[in-house]
Image: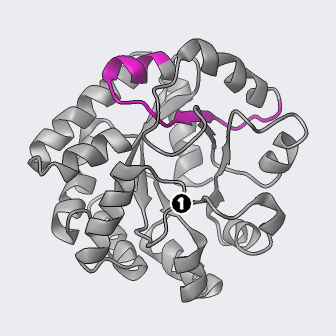
Amino acid sequence: MTRIDTTFARLKAEGKKAFVAYIMGGDPDAATSLAVMQGLPGAGVDIIELGIPFTDPMADGPTVQAAGQRALEAGMTLERVLAMVRAFRAGDSVTPIVLMGYYNPVYAQGVAGFLTAAKAAGIDGLIIVDLPPEEDAELCLPAQAAGLNFIRLATPTTDAKRLPKVLENTSGFVYYVSVTGITGAAAPVATDVAPEVARIKRSTDLPVIVGFGINTPEAARSIASVADGCVVGSAIVKEIGAGRPVAEVLAMVKALADGAHSA
C-alpha cells in the first residue's frame, strides 16, 4: 500500500472525507513554496498535490498558469521540485504527495530516471494530465511497477464507453473534474456532482475526489459530502500569488480543510 492508500483507509475508518490541496512547486520562490508545503499537514491537508511548472500548461486556468510562470522565472525545474519533496520528507514521512503536471518535463528527464528520482524523493503518485490511457505503457505502467499510484482524471464528458478505459490502470484515487473547462472555472454544484460520483463509483472501488472551482469552506463541505473528498487548488494559489504571508495562506487552507472534514 502507498501512503495514499493508507491515508484513505484511515479516513474511512474515522468516517472523514479527504481534503487535498494543490500548490505549484516553487511559487513564488523555492523557500516560500516549501514553507507553505511544510505547513499544509498542520492545516488539515490529507494529501498534497504539487505542481510541476511547465511552459505550456494547457489544462490550467489563468491563476495556476501565472503560478507556473512565477515558478519558472524563479528558476524552478522538475529536479528542484523533487528537491523540495526531499526537504519536506526530512520532517514528514506520512503525508502523501502527488506530483501533478505534464509529460514533457518527465520525458525530457527520461522515464526510468524520473521514476527512480521521484520514488527516492518520497513521491507517492502522479497525475499527468496530457497522457491518455492509450499511452499507459509510456509512464502509467512503469510508474505503478515502481510503486507509485497513477491517478486519472474523469470529467462530465467521460461517458459510459470511455469510463472503463479511464479506470483500467488507475490507482490511488479517481480525480473527478466537476466542471468542463480549465482549472479555477465555475463553482461546481453538489446536486450535479453527486450522480456523476455515484456513476463512477459503480465502476470502481477507488475513492473519488472532486476538484475544480471549489473556493470556500462551504463549497468544500458541500462537494465532499457527495464524494470521498475534494481538491482545492486555484483558490490557494491565488492567495500565494497575492503575496499573502505564509501564515495567512495556511489559515485559509485550514478553513477549507475544516469545511471538507465536516461533511
Q: Position of residue 120 (x, y in %)?
A: 48, 76
Instruction: Tell me if 35 is positioned left or right of 94 in this view.
Output: left
Q: Residue at x 31, y 35 (%)?
A: 44
Q: Position of residue 28 (x, y in %)?
A: 21, 63
Q: Quarter of the image for the C terminus: give it.
A: top left
Instruction: Tell me if 38 is positioned left or right of 228 in this view.
Output: left
Residue 67 is inside the magenta segment:
no
Q: Residue at x 35, y 16 (%)?
A: 218
Q: Nearer the viewer, residue 39 or 219?
A: 219
Q: Is residue 25 above or below residue 115?
A: above
Q: SS class of the residue under badge 1?
A: loop
Q: Residue at x 68, y 25 (%)?
A: 197
Image quarter of residue 54: bottom left
Instruction: Tell me if 84 is positioned left or right of 146 in this view.
Output: left
Q: Amino acid at mark 1?
A: Met
Q: Position of residue 141 (x, y in %)?
A: 76, 68
Does residue 118 appear in the picture of this structure?
A: yes
Q: Which residue is mark 1?
A: 58
Q: Residues within 10 Å of mark 1 (few under 14, many from 20)?
A: few
Q: Nearer the viewer, residue 51 or 173?
A: 51
- List the single residue furthest toward the right: 161
Q: Residue at x 34, y 50 (%)?
A: 63
Q: Nearer the viewer, residue 138 or 125?
A: 138
Q: Magenta residues?
A: 203-222
Q: Position of residue 101 (x, y in %)?
A: 51, 63
Image quarter of residue 206: top right
Q: Nearer the viewer, residue 65 or 118?
A: 65
